Every structure is written in structure tokens, then in C-alpha cells.
Image (tube, rainbow, N blue to C red):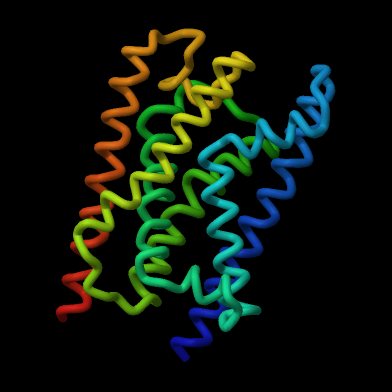
Amino acid sequence: MKNKIRIAYMALLAIMVWLALFIQFYISTEKYMSQGRTFGGAIVQLLSYFTIQNNFLVALAMTLFLFAPQSKWGKWFAKPAVLASMCVYITIVLLVYQLVLRGQHVQLGWFRVCDEIFHSISPPMFILFWLVFIPKEKLPWGKAINWLLYPLIYCVYILLRGAISNYYPYSFIDGTKLTYPQIAVNSFFLLLAFLSLGLLFIGVSRLAQKR
């Protein structure tokens, strides 16, 4: 029974996020191209969002667990450290949106629907999936440091791309409105949040494994 619930839960999460990604890409590329941007530029812009990247990883992981759990990538996503790191990243998506970004933009129609799925529904659903259905292991505390590499590379990419295109996906690292010292401070506290959440999820994993 638990396995059937697990399969249904993964299917629901995968279908929901894939549909939201498809709709988001369709309506956003249409909007960007109406503003004179190329199709390729619109795709790159969408893929530059940390939110889109991590919801894509969630949908991909659920799909692999359902249809190709023994494949190379299915086994890779199933690693305890990989799943725990995904919890860290998707939690940041949830918290930053709710605490910082929600009041900055008013979305309507399908944009609002996708926004809520990506920021308010998918993250807690994935965290719950990890808490309930994934066997826990005694992860090394040092993994929390390793998990900073992805957000660090992401920040560098966004700043370099923004310096060339004047486009920044998030207000707290917007080089057109903030000075680089301000961006450095914001990035430091953001990385500190990643580290703190990494230690939290490792602690939960170790405690669950011990019990």
C-alpha cells in the first residue's frame, strides 16, 4: 500500500510540474518574442531562473523514479546526498519567493498558476516526499559545503550574464539597481542560508537514520 501511495504521489508531482513548465515556457516565450527577443534568447532567459532549474530537476527525478529507476540517471538521483541537496535548493526557492519576491510582482492568469506551482506547491511536496518515502542515511556534515558549489556557480553565471545583457532574474542580485558590494552582501547571506539548510537536512537525515 505504501508503495502504491508513493507511486501515485510521484506521478502527481511529476505531471503537475511538467505541465507547469510546459505552460510557463509557452506563455513566456510568446511574451518575450512579442517584445522583440529571439526564441533562443527567450529559452535562455527562462532557464536562467533558479526556480525553473530546480523544478525541472524535481520533475525529472520523479519521472526517472517512475519509469527508469535502474538507469544511470535514475540511480544518480536516488542517491541520498543528491535528494537531500535537492531539498535544500527547492526550500530556498520556496523561502526566497515567500519572504522576498512575492510582493514584488503581481502575476495574472496562467502566469499566476505556474508561479504558485513552482514556488508554493512543488517545493513542500518534494520535501514531504523526501521526508516520508526516502530512506535516510548518515550523511557527512561536510556535504553542506559541497552543496554550495551549485548556487555559487549560479551566482557567478547570473552576474556575468547580467553584466553583458543587463538582465538579472532576481532583484537582490540586480546589477542595474544595486552596487556590487550590495550584491556581494546579499549573495553572502544567501549562501549562508544554503549552508544552514544543508546542515538542517543533514541533521534530519542523520537523526532519522539513527532511529
Of the 4 image quadrants, the one containing the C terminus is bottom left
Reply above or below: 154 against 124: above
Please state if 161 lies on the left or on the right of 149 as rendered.
right
**Residue depicted at 26% across the width and 59% down the height:** 201
**Residue depicted at 41% across the width and 49% down the height:** 89
Reply above or below: 170 against 16: above
In the rendering, at what x and y percent does residue 46 appear? Answer: 66, 36
Total number of numbered labels? 0
**Residue depicted at 21% across the width and 74% down the height:** 208
In the rendering, at what x and y percent does residue 97 appear? Answer: 43, 35
Name the one closer to the observer, 32 or 116: 32
In the rendering, at what x and y percent does residue 124 appear? Answer: 41, 56
Name the one closer to the observer, 55 or 4: 55
**Residue depicted at 73% across the width and 41% down the height:** 25
Please state if 109 lies on the left or on the right of 76 as rendered.
right
Asked which quadrant contains residue 57, the reply is bottom right
In the rendering, at what x and y percent does residue 15 appear? Answer: 66, 63
